[in-house]
Image (cartoon, rainbow, N blue to C red):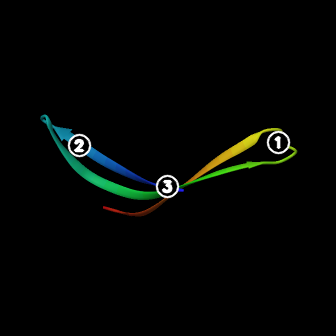
């Protein structure tokens, strides 16, 4: 489990401005099954804040 911040920016005439941000929780799942024959991976991303 970890955190991630996604930031959007816009550049106009060489001037870059931050236009938004999303704070997200990232959860990685790894699992296996005798029928799979290998490991499987899954990622869950959930936004919990931002503007």
Q: How far apart are marks 3 and 1 (CA)?
A: 27 Å
Question: Comparing marks 2 and 3, which lies closer to the viewer?
Answer: 3
Indicate which disc, 2 or 1, sits on the residue closer to the N terminus.
2
Work out which quarter of the rendered image holds the N terminus and state it: bottom right
Q: Residues within 10 Å of mark 3 (few under 14, many from 20)?
A: few
Q: Is residue 37 above or below residue 46?
A: above
Q: Which numbered marker is on residue 36?
A: 1
Q: How crowded is mark 1: few (under 14 residues within 10 Å), some or many (20 or more)?
A: few
Q: Residue at x 73, y 49 (%)?
A: 31
Q: Where is residue 37 in the image (x, y as percent from the top left)?
A: 83, 38
The span from disc 2 to disc 3 (Cα, nearest Å) is 27 Å
Residue 10, label in figure: 2
The residue under the point 49% across, 55% down is: 2
Quadrant in which the C terminus appears: bottom left
- Residue that label 3 marks: 2
Mark 1 secondary-structure assignment: loop
**What residue is shown at x 74% (from left), y 42% (from top)?**
39
Residue at the limit of the structure toward the bottom, as seen here: 48
How far across and down, in percent of the image, does residue 18 sit? 23, 49
Q: Is mark 2 on a helix, strand or loop?
A: strand
């Amino acid at each position: 489990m970890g955190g991630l911040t996604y930031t959007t920016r816009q550049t106009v005439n060489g001037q870059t401005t931050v236009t938004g941000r999303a704070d997200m929780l990232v959860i990685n799942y790894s699992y296996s099954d005798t029928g799979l024959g290998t490991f499987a991976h899954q990622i869950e991303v959930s936004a919990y804040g931002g503007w």
